[in-house]
Amino acid sequence: MSSKKERLEAICRIIQAEVICNQEELLKRLEAYDFSITQATLSRDIKQLKIARIHDGKDAYVYRLPNAALPVTSTSSSEQTKTHPAIEFSGNLVVVKTRPGYAMGIASDIDANAPHEILATIAGDDTILVIPREGYNRERIAEAIARFIQ
């Protein structure tokens, strides 16, 4: 029987190397590496590793490790800042994309330690709407927000 550490490392390797959309697929991949575990154990491992399911920008949700970068989708109607790919401007408003479940915590940090450039935030599950103060350019606003996101 393999150790938990080896199993967790295998899960990380699989998720980094392959497109895994659900626990059943991940269980099958682990079995190919001679790991025999239950769905409940896999679920606990996923929680411990803080693995999230994020939209792949097409039509599916895939597993990602917490330090994995968010996919950047480009749209011709919006301008993204060069400071951080998760920060996007729409007029004088700023949209910040986060991993699922992180937006409220980051928005709370921004509000609690608000730099002068930021008036307020509104957060959902994986998106923050930032309302900047008047009189600041986009680069300065993006720099102020980037201090709060990795």
Image (spheres, grey):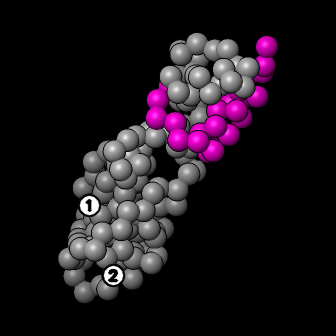
Give the residue at mark 2. 138
> In this orientation, does residue 130 appear?
yes
- Chief SS of the magenta region: helix
Q: Where does the image place residue 19, in percent across and percent down from the top left?
A: 53, 41
Q: SS class of the residue under badge 2?
A: helix
Q: Quadrant of the N terminus?
A: top right
Looking at the picture, which amino acid does disc 2 mark?
Answer: Arg
Q: Nearer the viewer, residue 129 or 2?
A: 2
Q: Of the residues shown, which amino acid type is indicated by label 1?
A: Leu
Q: Examine the rendered structure and indicate whether residue 5 appears above or below residue 121.
A: above
Residue 150 image label: none
Question: Is 127 placed above or below 48 here?
Answer: below
- Counting residues from the start of the chain, the first of labels 2 and 1 encountered is 1
User: Which residue carries the number 1 mark?
Assistant: 129
Q: Position of residue 58 (x, y in %)?
A: 35, 50
Give how far apart the Cα atoms at labels 2 and 1 are: 14 Å
Q: Which residues are magenta?
A: 1-23
* Percent of width and height locating residue 138: 33, 81
